[in-house]
Amino acid sequence: METTATSLKWAILLLANRPDIQDKAYKEIEDVLCSASFSYQDLKKLPYTNAVIHEIQRSKYPFLFGVPRQTAKDVTIRGFLIPKGTICALFFLIQSTGNLLKSSIQNIFLDQDGHFVAREEYLAFGGGARICLGEHLARMEFFIFLVNLMRAFHFQLPPGVKELNEEPVAAVTTPPHPYKVCAVPRCSSS
Ligand code: HEM
């Protein structure tokens, strides 16, 4: 729950700071989803929204150091010996900047025709035998909660606030600092 809640807090903050991205994703959602109810399968029809979701979790990863592991035996990777007992944390390659980037949405997660691109390097949930057991639940929850929230509200900065703080609180998980945002109800028929 902590990881998904942290990702949702970041999503609302980042979308409030970037109304152009929020509006584009909202338009895609309303154009594609015909009724109020939708399912996780609908994510396939929403490439831009899917790219935004991935970029939110890439740029504001909910863990400080992933989930630490310990090598059970000596391991050699590209000539480097990692002795038995070394504490390791997984860092995934494309998590190289803490800023949500419009260019990453366009260039990393979408192809030239606007189709979503699943990247091998995107290891937000780890990989191999110890991959996150909650990955599918977390992906579904994040998509369904976020899209429902975006359909119900337009997230705006409070009057007089130019930008919400995007520095994370450095703990085991990395939530944003507490913030206030205006959730303006949308006048949608759905
Ligand atoms: C945004 C949400 C989440 C993220 C980013 C995330 C990420 C991760 C990562 C990186 C690992 C370590 C994988 C590895 O070492 O290769 C992990 C492990 C794990 N996660 Fe998640 N997780 C999330 C949500 C959840 C949820 C919702 C659950 C359960 C309902 C869950 C249950 C677990 C468990 C049980 C493990 C340990 C698996 C093992 O050691 O075999 N996670 N998670």
Image (cartoon, helix red, strand yellow):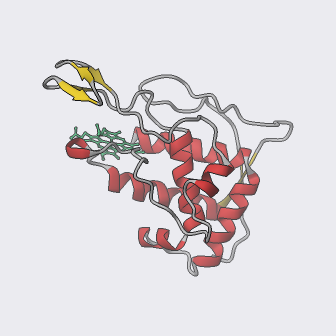
Image x and y of residue 188, in percent:
70, 72
Q: Is residue 188 left or right of residue 114?
A: right
In this orientation, does residue 20 appear? Answer: yes
- Say which residue appears at 42% left-offset and 40% top-offset: 3
Residue farthest along the bottom direction in this orientation: 34
> Residue 181: percent from the left, percent from the top?
70, 42
Residue 14 against residue 84 in the figure, above or below: below
- Quarter-of-image position of residue 172: top left
Q: Residue furthest front?
A: 79
Residue 185 visible (yes or no)? no
Residue at the image point whose x is 30% and y is 27% from the top: 68
Q: Front-most of 67 and 127?
A: 127
Q: Quadrant of the C terminus?
A: bottom right
Number of on-image labels: 0
Pinpoint residue 142: horizontal percent, then vertical percent. 47, 54
Q: Is residue 61 left or right of residue 105?
A: left
Q: Nearer the viewer, residue 36 or 105?
A: 105
User: What is the x, y in percent for residue 31?
Assistant: 65, 77
- Please report the residue visible at 75 percent of the width from the left and 53 percent of the height from the top: 19
Q: Could you tell whether 150 is left or right of 67 in the image?
A: right
144 with respect to 34 (left or right): left
Q: Give the quadrant of the N terminus.
A: top left
Q: Residue furthest left?
A: 73
> In which quadrant of the rendered view does residue 69 lie?
top left
- Image quadrant of ligand 1? top left
Q: Residue at x 43, y 48 (%)?
A: 122
Taking 188 as reference, is 158 above or below it?
above
